Image: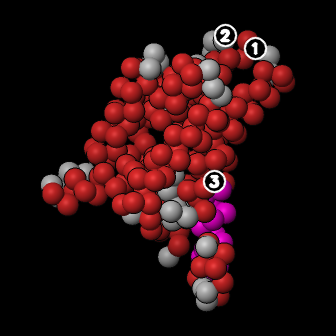
Amino acid sequence: MILEFVFKMDTMDKHRFIKSTIISFAGIFGMGFFLSLLIMADYGTDPYTFMNRAIASTLGMTLGNWQLLINIVFLLIVIIFDRKLIGPGTIFNMVLIGYYADFFVWLWKKLLPPGLFVEQPSRALVFAVAIAAFVVCAAVYMNADAGLSPYDGSCKIFTEAVRRKWKGIPFFILRIVCDTAVILTGMAAGGRPTIGIIIIALTLGPAISIVGKLMKGADK
């Protein structure tokens, strides 16, 4: 279906499609890479990963396997309410991030000294770099216009529905509402929220808006 859509594009549209797909893939790879460092530093991850790790641990599953299953549920919501949000980035995010994180966590345990993620100040430094890079990568992927993840697409459907009724509510406030809901779900599944979750929940919405403006400016 996507290939048929691409073949029907003119040359300029194909160029934009390929560019946005590459940017989306790069952002998603970065998210999986830096997410693994956040997991190792153990100061907290993004809210969605926090929820999925808590549920996966309760069920005795890996993060990648559980996240793929719950993403399928969110994907059905997006298909029903706004399938225009689906693109290559949707599939990349849906399938890859959890498995990237699982792989790199395994790799760091094999290659890096355990003290790096336990002792200070190295642990705090890893966390600070990883959380800043993760937020930027997430904002890049979401602004690449190559499709949103099932969870992000569901959040967008929710925010747009709310803003149609109450136009004055900023996007980032509603994004915080979505992230807070999954944090509470993770806590109900036995997860323990830490500072990283709060930082990402409060900064991801504004970062998406800022990076979006920068990327649009760079395209001009």
Disc 1 marks which amino acid? Pro
The answer to whether residue 77 is seen in the rendering is yes
Q: Nearer the viewer, mark 2 or mark 1?
A: 1
Residue drawn at the location 80% of the way across and 16% of the way down: 113
Q: Crowding at label 1, few (<14), some or many (≥20) Cα neighbours within 10 Å?
A: few
Query: Which stretch is magenta?
Result: 14-25
Q: On the image, numbered disc 3 is attached to which residue?
A: 92
Q: On the image, numbered disc 2 is attached to which residue?
A: 119
- Residue 23: which disc? none
Q: On the image, numbered disc 1 is attached to which residue?
A: 114
**Which residue is at the front of the view, 198 or 156?**
156
Q: Secondary structure at mark 3?
A: helix
Q: Crowding at label 2, few (<14), some or many (≥20) Cα neighbours within 10 Å?
A: few
- In primary-sequence order, the first of circles 3 and 1 is 3
The answer to whether residue 133 is seen in the rendering is no
Disc 3 marks which amino acid? Phe
The quadrant holding residue 101 is top right
